[in-house]
Image (cartoon, rainbow, N blue to C red):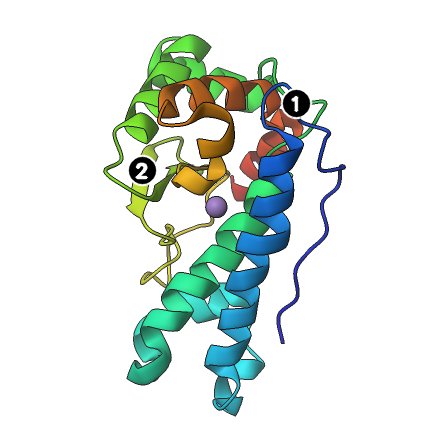
Amino acid sequence: MFTLPGLDYDYDALNGHISKAIMELHHSKHHQTYVDKLNAAIKDAPELQDKTIEELLRGIDAVPEQVRTAIRNNGGGHYNHSQFWKWMSPEGGHEPTGALADGLKEKYGSFQGFIDEFSGKAANIFGSGWAWLQPDLSITVSPLQDSPLTNSSDNPEPILGLDVWEHAYYLDYFNRRPDYIKAWWDVVNWAEVERRFGESQ
Ligand code: MN3
């Protein structure tokens, strides 16, 4: 049984960037639904119930076909959102420091160069999906609730990810995804990204 993780901050903590209405709906309804549907999908498959969410996604090809899509989408949704909440913080924003800052500067010319590249890729995802920063500091995108883990047993976990599903921004920004992305940088929890980058090296 998987459960909905709590947030490290209140629903209204990101107000001004991401509203309480979005945070509450996104966490208590959307994420909860992924958890419920994931649990329903593994209910009759005892061999899947001891696996971690990472193991389920990395081994998605080995999952019985009749529940594979449900686990890919809802398990992916559970994993992605569990990380996403930690990648944001009311104390977030500013710029990374240390080795991560140096690495981004080296790869993208400047911190702003990285922001522009990541924002552009996220803005251009057709329909629903996610943009990711990998431990090697490359930027990738995935459709729906896929992630670097899906379908690959050796991909490392991403160190940062951005949800660009409309449910993540529509109540605040309507169709203006680039405005949401711009506001999101103000709440990015760089301390957490730095921690993950450090552990991945
Ligand atoms: Mn979402």
Q: Residue at x 45, y 12 (%)?
A: 111
**Does residue 163 sit above or below 150 in this rendering?**
above
Residue 128 picture location, percent across and down: 32, 44
- The image quadrant of residue 165 is top left
**Does residue 29 sit above or below 3 in this rendering?**
above
Residue at the disc numbered 2: 140
Q: Residue at x 50, y 32 (%)?
A: 171
| SS state under label 1 | loop
| SS state under label 2 | strand
Residue 193 picture location, percent across and down: 58, 33
Q: Is residue 34 visible?
A: yes
Q: Residue at x 61, y 18 (%)?
A: 93
Q: Amino acid at mark 1?
A: Gly
- In screen coordinates, is 40 left or right of 15? left
- Between 161 and 102, the residue placed more toward the observer is 161
* Number of the label disc, if any, that sits on residue 137: none
Precedes in sequence: disc 2 or disc 1 = 1
Residue at the disc numbered 1: 92
Q: Is residue 133 visible?
A: no
Specify whether tag 2 is near ligand 1 (CB below 8 Å).
no
Report how far apart the C-alphas of labels 2 and 1 lie in the structure: 22 Å
Q: Amino acid at mark 2?
A: Thr
